[in-house]
Image: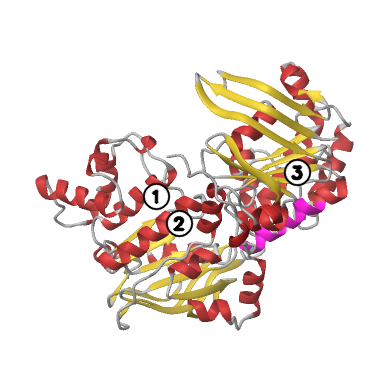
Amino acid sequence: MSLLLIENLSVVIHDQPILDHVDLSIAPGQIVAVTGESGSGKSMTALAAMQLLPNGAVCQGSIQLDGQEMLDQSEAELCALRGASVGMVFQEPMTALNPVRTIGDQVMETILIHKAMSPAQARSRAQEVLSRVGLPSDRFPMSRYPHELSGGQRQRVVIAMAIALRPRLLIADEPTTALDVTTQAQILRLLRDLVTEYGMGLLMITHDLAVVGEMADDIVVMRKGKVVESGKTQHLLRHMRHPYTRMLFEASGHQVALPEPPPPQALLEVKNVVREYTLPRKRLFDPPGRHRAVDDVTFTLSRGERLGLVGESGCGKSTLTRAILGLENIQGGQISLGGQSVFAVKKTNMAVRRKMQVVFQDPFGSFNPRHRVARLITEPFHLLEVPPAGSEKQDRIAEMLTAVGLSPDDANKYIHEFSGGQRQRIAIARALIIKPELILFDEAVSALDVSVRAQILDLLADLCAAYGLTYLFISHDLSVVRTITDRVMVMKAGRIVEQGETERVFSDPQHPYTRDLIAAAPRLPAMDVSASVASPLLES
C-alpha cells in the first residue's frame, strides 16, 4: 500500500496552470526523487502534498496520505497531520529557523504544538533527535542559536524538527543545494539512515541528478508542471526515453572548452597571509581566545589564468576572498594586485580595489529591486575617477548586456522580471562593466539548476575568449571547478593543503583531504545511449 499517493493532480493559481495531471506514489521505506529545472513544479508538488499552497490555488485530483484524502481535510485537521504524520525539510535552513530562539526550543516547539508530550518529555525528545542527527548536547548545547552553527549543522536542526514526532512521510526540498561535498554526503547519509531506521517514506526534491542516482529508489522527472518520465532510478538514468531527461543528464556533466591561458605573468600575489579573529572569553578573567581563519596562505594568480578554490564550509575560503578584496584587514603577510598592495596603511587601497569585481552566489539578493538594470550594472562606475556619461555610458551598458547574452533593451527592466540564470548574467555584466583585471566568483552557480548552470559556464568560457578574463572561482561543486579552471587550490582549516593543475589534482590527488573531497562528491551513473528510445522533440 502506498504511503503517499498522488493521482491526476492539477493545480491552478489565479487562473494560471501550475501542475498538470501529476501522478506519484511513495511506499514506506522508499525514497522517491522529483527532479527538473526551476519552475518545473517540483516544489509546488511538495507544497500540494502538505496542502500549503498559496491563496488562490485550486486543486483537482487526489492526494492520499495513508489512504486519507488530504483535499477533504479541514485546516485544523491538516495542522494535526503536519509535523506529526508528514514533516518537511526546507531548502534554506537559515530562513526556516527562527534566529531569536534556541535550537532546543525550536525542536521542542513541534512536539509541544501537537501536545504529544509534557515539556520535560519534549526537552528529552528534542535532545534525543538532535543527537540522532549528529548534534549531541555535549558538543552542541540546546541553548545555541542558529547563527552559532554552520550551514550543515543548521540543516541538521531543520531535519531534527521534521522528524521529532517520527512522521510517516518526510519531504526534503533541495536539502543539500548550498552545502559542500562532505557536508552534503553526511546529510544524504543521515536521510538514508532515517528512512531505514524509521521506515518512513522520503520525497526528495533536487535538480542534482548525481544525488538522485545515489539516493533514490525511484525518480520522477518534471517539466512545466507535467511528469515527462518516471521509473526505477538506475534503469531510468541508463535508459532515458524522453529528450528532456537526456538534456538534464547531459547538462549535469557539461564540459566547457576554455581557451589556452597566456604565458605566466603574475597579477595577484598572496604571500604568507594570516587572518585571525578574537573569540569570546570562556570565563570572566580568562584571556580571549584566537581563531586563525586564514593561516599562512601563499599563491600567485597569473593574468588570463582561471584559478579554483575548493574546501569545506568554514575552511577560510570566504575570509580569504574578503581579504583579497580589501574588505578585511590581515594580521600578517601581503596581498598585491599588479605589484600594488591591496592595503594602504591598514585601509583598502581604492586604486587597487577598482581593478577587482565580485559575482555573488545569490544574484537576486545582491541587487536593489527598486532600480532598473541600467542603474544596477553601472554601480561599479562609482569606483572610477572619471565614470562614463551620456552616450558613452549607454554604449557601455549595451555592450555588456550583449556580451552576457541579453538584449540592450533589458536595461530598462527591473530585476524581478528575469529568471535566476538571467539575473546571474546581469551580475556578470555588472562585474565586467569597468573591465576589471580580476573577477572573484563566490559560489556563482551553486544555486542554479543544471541546464542554467551549463549556460553560465559556457558564457564564462566565451567571455574568457573575448575579454581574456582572469578569475578566482570559489565553489564547493568539484565538477564545476574541474571544467572551468586551469589550476585549483584545496583549502582546509585556513591552509592551502594542495594546489596544481586542475586535471592533475582531480585525477591524482596527493593530500588525504583532497582525496576525501573527491570521494565524497556524488557521481552520475553511466548512460546507455544505444538503449535510449527517440521521443518527440521538446516543446519550445
What kind of residue is marked 1? Gln
Q: Nearer the viewer, mark 2 or mark 3?
A: 2
Of residues 88 and 282, which is closer to you in this image? 88
In the depicted structure, whether residue 115 falls above or below residue 292: above
Helix, strand or loop under label 3: strand
128 inside magenta stretch: no
Residue at 47 percent of width and 68 percent of height: 483
Residue at 46 percent of width and 48 percent of height: 362
Of the numbered discs in the image, which one, if any, rests on residue 202?
Answer: 3
Q: Which quarter of the rendered picture does the C terminus lie within?
A: top left
* Residue 288 horizontal side relative to residue 500, left or right: right
Helix, strand or loop under label 2: helix
Q: Which residues are magenta?
A: 181-193
Image location of residue 87, percent across then percent down? 75, 36
What kind of residue is marked 3? Leu
Of the numbered discs in the image, which one, if any, rests on residue 424?
Answer: 1
State the scheme by which the image is colored: secondary structure
Q: Which quarter of the rendered picture does the N terminus lie within?
A: top right
Magenta span: chief secondary structure = helix
In the depicted structure, whether residue 422 falls above or below residue 345: above
Of residues 527 and 211, which is closer to you in this image? 527
Residue at 66 percent of width and 60 percent of height: 183
In the depicted structure, whether residue 59 falls above or below residue 522: above
Q: Which residue is mark 2?
A: 454
* Residue 176 horizontal side relative to residue 452, left or right: right
